[in-house]
Image (cartoon, rainbow, N blue to C red):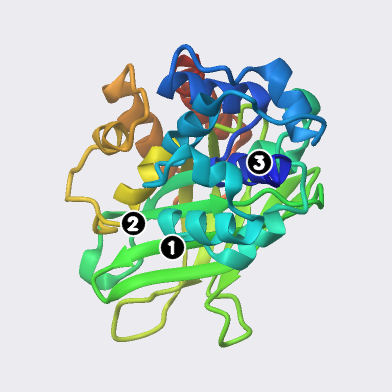
Amino acid sequence: MARDIDRKLRLTAAVLGMAARKDLAAAFRRINPKTAFDIGRADKWLQGRAQPREHQVYEDWSKVLGLDRPGQWIADCDIEAFIDEISAHHGRDREELQRALETSGVRKNGQGPALGLAGTFVSYSHAWSPYFRGRLIRGELSVFAASSPSRLPATYSENLPTGRMELAGTIAIGKRGMHLAVDDGTSGMPTMSFCLFPASPPVSVLAGLMIGTTIIGPDAQPSVTRIVMVRVPPSAAPRLRAVDAYLPAQGSVAEDLATLGLHVDDATGTDRGITDFLSGGGGAFDQVAVPAYRALADLFDRSWLARTP
């Protein structure tokens, strides 16, 4: 008999950054256009009122998560084994996944900041290291769903020449902005802090300022840069965790996004939009203007919605 189906589905949605039941159903349809997983049935399954009867649903489910397991294993395993498997396969912290179970994961009508922000973002900002001056650096932001509507666990990482840097913290969501401070868990002091514009559906892009000190260099220099964080499909995670953080000199962000599975219609416009945002400010004062962020949101909202079935 199938076990913990509602909790496994909620965890699946959290890991994949699904913004609503329809997104979860769309993920199943991409694997199998004839899948028996649909929004109506998923509503009952997520509430624990019923379980999938068709064996193929579990087979599709295993493929959605990219697991090397038969569908019957998903049906039969307990929730602890399920968490162990997907945390290992997707490179996620087990405790973060455990906390993700505190939320519904797929709320009715897909509302709520915790649900809307959950997912994976690739970030682009100016490199702080004097050895990579003038280059852009790529990072990964992972946001996890949580029961609190205003505080979400998150991790920020970069694949540096000195090794992978992984920092964790909590995004605080307010009416006038979002703030994230991350650290390595040993010093008790934030390694980096982010001040971001409030997000709006479909949360295709986040942007604002990143503050901290240089990581690679002879001295720890106080630094600040504008940063753009673009939502990418869950399938982008393995590549994000394998490529070097520093983009090539004169490298195209649009081309980089395309390799991560994001639909980019206008590569030139995308590169120009990100360059204009990151190059703003100057002088002794930098205050990011709302129109600058809105231009990014308009650009990436269209790209993100274009890939939604």
Kindly identify which numbered label has been placed on residue 157: 1
Label 2 sits on what residue type?
A: Arg
Label 1 sits on what residue type?
A: Ser
- At x 46%, y 15%, the residue is 306
Q: Earlier in the sequence, mark 2 or mark 1?
A: 1
- At x 30%, y 48%, the residue is 239
Figure check: 43 above or below 183: above
Foreground mark, 3 or 2, reads 3
Q: Which residue is mark 3?
A: 2
- At x 44%, y 35%, the residue is 233
Question: Residue 87 at x, y = what percent?
Answer: 50, 59
Q: The N terminus appears in which quarter of the rendering?
A: top right
Q: Is residue 260 left or right of residue 303?
A: left
Question: What is the CA distance from the residue labelled 2 to the residue labelled 1?
Answer: 9 Å
Asked if disc 3 and disc 2 are in contact, CB closer than 8 Å, the reply is no
Q: Earlier in the sequence, mark 3 or mark 2?
A: 3
Foreground mark, 2 or 1, reads 2
Is residue 231 among what the camera can see? no
Single out the residue that lies furthest toward the front.
1
Q: Earlier in the sequence, mark 3 or mark 1?
A: 3
Label 3 sits on what residue type?
A: Ala
Q: Which residue is mark 2?
A: 241
Question: Residue 58 at x, y = what percent?
Answer: 53, 33
Q: Residues within 10 Å of mark 3 (few under 14, many from 20)?
A: some
Q: Residues within 10 Å of mark 1 (few under 14, many from 20)?
A: many
Labels in figure, total: 3
